Image: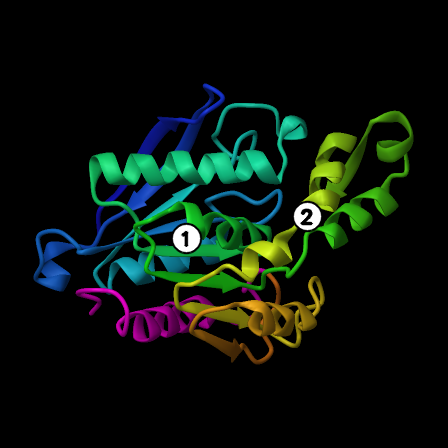
Amino acid sequence: MPSSRINFMNAAGKQIAGIMELPSPLATGEENPDTFALFAHCFTCTKDLKAIVRISRALAKRNIGVLRFDFTGLGDSQGNFADTNIESNLADIQSASHWLAEHHHAPSLLIGHSLGGAAMMAAVESIPSSRALVTLASPSCTRHLAEFLGSQNPEINSTGSGTVTIGGRTHIIKKQMLDSLRNFDLKERIQRINVPHMILHSPADETLDFRHAVDIFENTAGAKSLITLVDSDHLFVNRVNDATYVADLIATWGSRFLPAIK
């Protein structure tokens, strides 16, 4: 199955790294997929998170081309993570969408995990090609993350920056990021979502409470589906077949709204 590393420039002039997963013509019988997806990773994660890699490759087997990329300052992308915020994430999504449109087809399926899902919910209205949205273990607001980060190191609020360890890695967090997360009105964006929206979350998720999924479901304006992932963790690693199961759900659900999904 063809996988290729790609790069594109974002609005701030930084090089963003991505990986394009394309279906194998031998497996699908098609030369080019009709459906392309854009996949946004979680906070401080990268495009190489095991679940994202596995889900993307499983979707490619179902005739969906998937672009997964690193947000500014993370993974292989240029830039300083400490200078990023929810608004810069939205700008990176737009740049990734433009690259797909120029080199393949504009994305019709948007997928986001955790904070990447929040960014996708906020971005969907500004991507005219989008026909369906999938969010995985995503928050219904961004303020909770600001409060969590501030509680981990009060120096962020008092002095303007501080270090926080997440997933075994230490990151510099600036107050501007917390302010962005506190002030961003995600609920208002969710209420404007008018494409079919599938919400996947596990009641066993110890990182982000399941109530966020319920809030998203209640506030999404258009067609929506809430699917409970029994016993899954936040990163979809504690159950071997979770990624394949999620990909199957996305493909089956998406076949109602998107072309040529196998």
- SS under mark 1: helix
The image shows residue 140 at horizontal and vertical percentages of: 64, 61
Q: Label 1, on which residue?
A: 53
Amino acid found under the numbered disc labelled 2: Gly
Q: Is 175 on the left or on the right of 238, as rendered? A: right
Question: Does the magenta segment cover residue 210?
Answer: no
For the question of whether residue 123 can be seen, the reply is yes
The image shows residue 139 at horizontal and vertical percentages of: 64, 60
Q: Give the camera-side residue of 37 and 23.
A: 37
Question: Does the magenta segment cover residue 237?
Answer: yes
Q: Is 148 on the left or on the right of 22, as rendered? A: right
Q: Is 22 on the left or on the right of 152, as rendered? A: left
Q: Label 2, on which residue?
A: 167
Q: Looking at the image, which residue sits at the far top?
A: 13
Amino acid found under the numbered disc labelled 1: Val
Q: Which residues are magenta?
A: 235-262
> Quarter of the image containing the C terminus?
bottom left
Q: Give the camera-side residue of 218 and 147.
A: 218
Q: Residues within 10 Å of mark 1 (few under 14, many from 20)?
A: some
For the question of whether residue 174 can be seen, the reply is no
